Amino acid sequence: MSKPIPPRPGLGAGRARLAEMLRVDHAGELAAVHIYRGQRAVLNAAPGKDRIAYQLQEMEAHEAAHLARFDEILNERQVRPTLMAPVWRLAGFALGVGTALMGEKAAHACTEAVETVIEDHYQRQIDELEKREPALAAELKQFREDELAHRDQAVEEGAKDAPGYGLLSAVIKAGCRGAIAISEKV
């Protein structure tokens, strides 16, 4: 696990760093909601896929609750969302559709890859915020636990048995890391 980013010097630096964190967290939850919507668009229409469709609906509901909370936090703290939001909505939906079309295990592999990156990302933020923003760190801990539960469920459902799992997982993880870096700044 990587170390948290050290505090920046200068007036307003702590606020700027917090804005970056909140912006990327909001973007991540937005993308997650759309990934699940894309997967459900495919799997809800497929015969015999009621079980996974229900699982995806539950996970989407968790992500939607996280997104709603980040909407509130951004408004409370007067932080603008990422300008990339329309792109992340589309990319998330396309990723969801694409992995669902590859099959249930690929849809689970997508969840496993995304949640692995997000879990690490949240943990680094928690480590950074525990002393200066303990209430926010506590909320992020709960969100992290939800993400871990999604990841663990995906693994139990056969994520690592997806065709081309290694490559699929690596590409999705790289995309998530890139989106995080972009969303912090843009």
Image (tube, grey):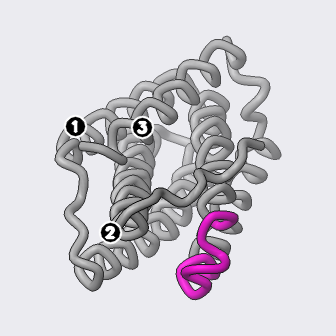
Q: Would you place residue 69 above or below residue 177 in this image? A: below
| Whole-percent x, y for residue 171 in the image | 55, 19
Q: Nearer the viewer, mark 1 or mark 2?
A: 2
Disc assigned to residue 35: none
Query: Mark 2 and mark 3: span between their CA atoms?
Result: 20 Å
> Earlier along the polypeptide chain: callout 2 or callout 3?
2
> Earlier along the polypeptide chain: callout 1 or callout 2?
2
Asked if residue 26 shows in the view, the reply is no
The image quadrant where one finds the N terminus is: top right
- The residue beneath circle 1 is 87
Q: Residue at horizontal 30%, vertical 44%?
A: 185
For the residues labelled 1 and 2, say whether their Cβ atoms are less than 8 Å apart: no
Tell me the kind of residue under disc 1.
Val
Query: Mark 1 and mark 3: span between their CA atoms?
Result: 14 Å
For the residues labelled 1 and 3, say whether their Cβ atoms are less than 8 Å apart: no
Q: Residue at horizontal 42%, vertical 37%?
A: 181
Query: Mark 1 and mark 2: span between their CA atoms?
Result: 29 Å
The image quadrant where one finds the C terminus is: top left
| Whole-percent x, y for residue 69 in the image | 39, 78
In this view of the protein, which residue sits in the foreground, 16 or 117?
16
| Label 3 SS | helix
- The residue beneath circle 3 is 181
Tell me the kind of residue under disc 2.
Gly
- The residue beneath circle 2 is 12
Q: Which residues are magenta?
A: 126-138
| Label 1 SS | helix
| Label 2 SS | loop
Dot 3, crowdedness within 10 Å: few (<14), some or many (≥20)? few
Q: Would you place residue 100 above or below residue 146 in this image? A: above
Dot 2, crowdedness within 10 Å: few (<14), some or many (≥20)? few
In this view of the protein, which residue sits in the foreground, 49 or 103?
103
